[in-house]
Image: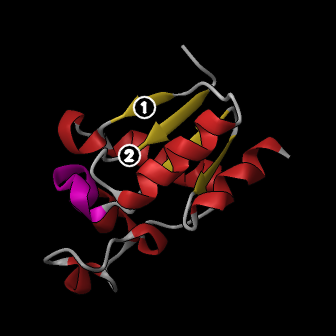
């Protein structure tokens, strides 16, 4: 298993750009298709803590119901993301004890500085 994990959706343009960027630099990674496999509340909290961002900061506002969650408590947002993974912004890249929301895709390079 690689020490880099990318939480992505293969049909996402930004996710594909991050994958291309990592591959072009010879960086191996494991991908998690969290839209298909699901993601637990505990793992969402862990990844957000590694990135130093809130659930509110990763709420995908284009999704139905996201606007109503924008002012909700963090626990409620995380629970909604676990129930409906499409609410979680992507891609999120984890390397060791750090993570980034790779938007724009070049932000992933911060993990390798």
Q: Position of residue 64 (x, y in %)?
A: 13, 77
Any part of residue 91 in sight: no
Q: Which residues are magenta?
A: 80-87
Residue furthest out toward the top = 1
Residue 105 is a magenta residue: no
Residue extending furthest toward the left: 64
Q: Is residue 74 above or below residue 35?
A: below
Locate residue 70, reporting x and y percent: 33, 83
- According to the image, label 2 marks what residue? 8
Q: Nearer the viewer, residue 50 or 33?
A: 33
What residue is shown at x 65% (from left), y 37% (from top)?
24
Asked whether residue 24 appears in the rendered view, the answer is: yes
Front position in the image: 71 or 103: 103
Residue at mark 1:
31
Q: For marks 1 and 2, give the CA distance.
A: 7 Å
Q: Is 86 within the magenta?
A: yes
Vertical placement of residue 22 versus 91, above or below = above
Vertical placement of residue 65 versus 27, above or below: below
* Residue 36: x %, y % from top left: 19, 38
Give the SS element for disc 1: strand
Cβ–Cβ under 8 Å for marks 1 and 2: yes
**Residue 39: which quarter of the image?**
top left
How far across and how far down the image is residue 76, in percent?
28, 66
At 73% from the left and 50% from the top, the residue drawn is 109
10 Å crowding of disc 2: few (<14), some (14-19), many (20+) = many
Q: Which mark is residue 15?
A: none
The residue under the point 59% across, 34% down is 23
Q: Residues within 10 Å of mark 1 (few under 14, many from 20)?
A: some
């Amino acid at each position: 298993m690689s020490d880099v994990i990318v939480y992505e959706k293969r049909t996402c343009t930004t996710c594909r750009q991050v994958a291309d960027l990592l591959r072009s630099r010879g960086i191996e990674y494991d991908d998690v298709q969290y839209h298909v496999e699901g993601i637990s509340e505990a793992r969402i909290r862990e990844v957000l803590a590694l990135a130093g961002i809130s659930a509110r900061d990763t709420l995908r506002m284009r999704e139905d119901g996201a606007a109503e969650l924008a002012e909700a408590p963090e626990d409620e947002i995380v629970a909604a993301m676990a129930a409906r993974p499409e609410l979680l912004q992507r891609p999120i890249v984890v390397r060791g004890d750090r993570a980034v929301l790779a938007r724009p895709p070049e932000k992933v390079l911060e993990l390798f500085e």
